[in-house]
Image (cartoon, rainbow, N blue to C red):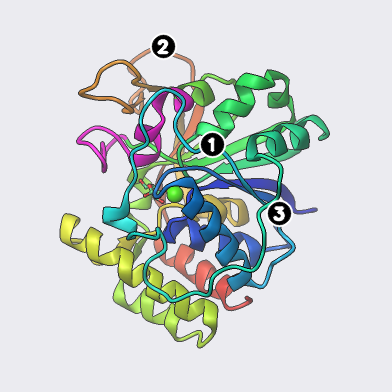
Amino acid sequence: MSPRKIIIDTDPGQDDAVAILLALASPKEIDVLGITCVAGNVPLALTSKNALMICELAGHTDVPVFAGCDRPLGRELVTAEHVHGETGLNGPTLPDPYMQLQDQHAVDFIIETLRAAAPKSITLCPLGPLTNIATALQRAPEIAEAVDEIVLMGGAYFEVGNITPTAEFNIYVDPQAADIVFKSGISIVVMSLDVTHKALVTPPRNEAFRALGTPVGKAVSEMTDFFERFDKEKYGSEGAPLHDPCVTAYLVDPTLFKGRHINVEIETQSELTMGMTVADWWGVTDRPANALFIKDIDADGFFTLLTERLSRL
Ligand code: BDR
Ligand code: CA
């Protein structure tokens, strides 16, 4: 089978970085057409710079990287330096990038690529707020036809929220954008906090990254070490959740994950519950299913896959 053609839409972020590295290490399964950056964990100038640094770390300087929207559709930008550090990629010391961003805006790249593509031939992989994707869908609704699937990290049902008591960060930052995406009619796979909070970098898993003895292995272990401090303190967990790599791991081996086809709607009105993913897990409404909502993961299988793939870079 030929590799799935994907666009990674991202706000790196240490976990975004690992997701990108996993994709770039898996050319038999994944063909990365481009990386589009959005404001999220840190402002756009930093997420774009971080994406370039990650491509260089991976040795994939041929991947085009685009800067996109610098703020959500209708709200002030909320960032997460308290989790990811001032640069968004605190932990390892990586050199400033020599790669350049493409001149084209990320949204124009998404529209142009999808307009030129066959029906259902491209997978979109959003790892941050959905601003770029929603803007592209608003400006050129016909591009939806070219999308095979959107596999995204965002939302929660059982875990409820991480940035507010009821909302997950990516959805909370741009709820209007999320609403547009979830109403788009495109097939959606949701890597919710319910699954990503089971993908924990325990000390032995972190040690396995370091033991690769490569610049990538060292950088990943330092990134997850940094990220870990916050989550360990907050949740008392054994390690940091690798949220975004669940998206790219799903593309390589979907059998690692389990979920249900359900209806998911986004709260866009109430300040109290803004950005909540109202997920009908128990099927108590007759609202039609619009997403495969992932809740469970074979965590050992996931870390075995991830470590083996990182060893290839
Ligand atoms: C999501 O928010 C960001 O902080 C992470 O990169 C991930 O995409 C988790 O809620
Ligand atoms: Ca992210």
Cα–Cα span, label 2 and label 1: 35 Å
Cα–Cα span, label 2 and label 3: 43 Å
Q: Is residue 236 above or below residue 102?
A: below
At which x and y percent is residue 270? 26, 17
Instruction: Please indicate, yes or no, whether residue 210 appears anywhere in the rendered image.
Output: yes
Label 1 vs 3, first from the N-terminus: 3
For residue 287, what is the image quadrant?
A: top left
Cα–Cα span, label 1 and label 3: 17 Å
Task: Check mark 2 vs ligand 1: CB closer than 8 Å? yes or no.
Answer: no
Q: Disc 1 or disc 3, which is closer to the eye?
A: 1
Q: Circle 1 sits on which residue?
A: 69
- The reply to whether dot 2 and dot 3 touch (C-beta < 8 Å) is no
Left or right relative to 283: residue 213: right
Is residue 164 on the magenta stretch? yes
Binning the other alpha carbons within 10 Å of mark 2 as few (below 14), some (14 to 19) or many (20 upward) gives few
**Residue shown at 37% from the left, 67% from the top:** 90
**Residue shown at 58% from the left, 32% from the top:** 133
Looking at the rendered structure, the kind of residue marked 1 is: Cys
Q: Secondary structure at mark 3?
A: loop
Q: Circle 3 sits on which residue?
A: 64
Binning the other alpha carbons within 10 Å of mark 1 as few (below 14), some (14 to 19) or many (20 upward) gives many
Left or right relative to 147: residue 301: left
- The boundaries of the magenta stretch are 157-178
**Residue shown at 49% from the left, 38% from the top:** 70
Label 2 vs 1, first from the N-terminus: 1
Q: Disc 2 or disc 3, which is closer to the eye?
A: 3
Task: Judge by depth and name the residue closer to the eye, 109 or 269.
Answer: 109
At which x and y percent is residue 39? 46, 43
Q: Secondary structure at mark 1?
A: loop
Q: Circle 2 sits on which residue?
A: 286
